[in-house]
Amino acid sequence: MARFLIEVPHDGSTEACVRTIELFLRTGSYFLAQADWGCKDGEHKAWFTIEVGTKDEARAVVPAEYRPIAKIVQLNTFSQTEIADLLRRHGA
C-alpha cells in the first residue's frame, strides 16, 4: 500500500467552511472525519493521509465535488542507504 497526503481547499467564507467540514464529517469515512483543518488560521484547506493502492483510489475518498481541486501527493521516506546511493549516482 502507498501512503498519500490529500489536501482539499475550499472557499474562505464561514458558510463554505461549515458546509465543507459538515460534509467531511457526514461521510462516515474515518479518514475524512480525522482531517486537519487550517480555517482558524486563514488557510481554508483540509489535510489527511490515507494508505491505499493508487492515487486514483486516494482521490476516490474525497467527496465528489472536491475531487477536481484536491491535491494528492504520494508520500515516501528515505533510508540512509538510499540517500547514499542517490548521492553516489548523481556525483554529489
Image: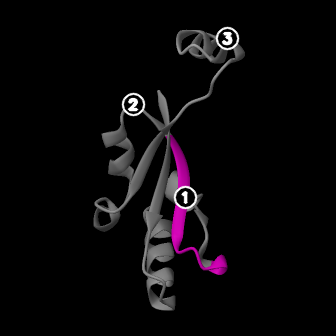
Residues marked 1 and 2 touching at CB (< 8 Å)? no
Point out which mark residue 53 bears.
Answer: 2
> Which of the marked residues, 1 or 2, is nearer the chain's N terminus?
1
Q: Residue at x 57, y 60 (%)?
A: 35
Give residue 26's position: percent from left, percent from top. 46, 69
In the figure, residue 68 lies in which quadrant?
Answer: bottom left
Return the residue nearer the eye: 8 or 28. Answer: 8
- Residue found at the very far front of the displayed protein: 91
Identify the element where label 1 is drawn: strand
Tell me if 36 is positioned left or right of 73 in this view: right
Determine the CA span between mark 1 and mark 2. 19 Å
Determine the CA span between mark 3 and mark 1. 30 Å
* Residues in magenta, as a range: 40-50
Q: Residue at x 51, y 74 (%)?
A: 21
Residue pointed to by mark 3: 81
Residue type at mark 3: give it: Thr
Residue 91 lies, with reference to residue 34, above or below; the image says above
Identify the element where label 3 is drawn: helix
Residue pointed to by mark 1: 47
Q: Is residue 30 visible?
A: no
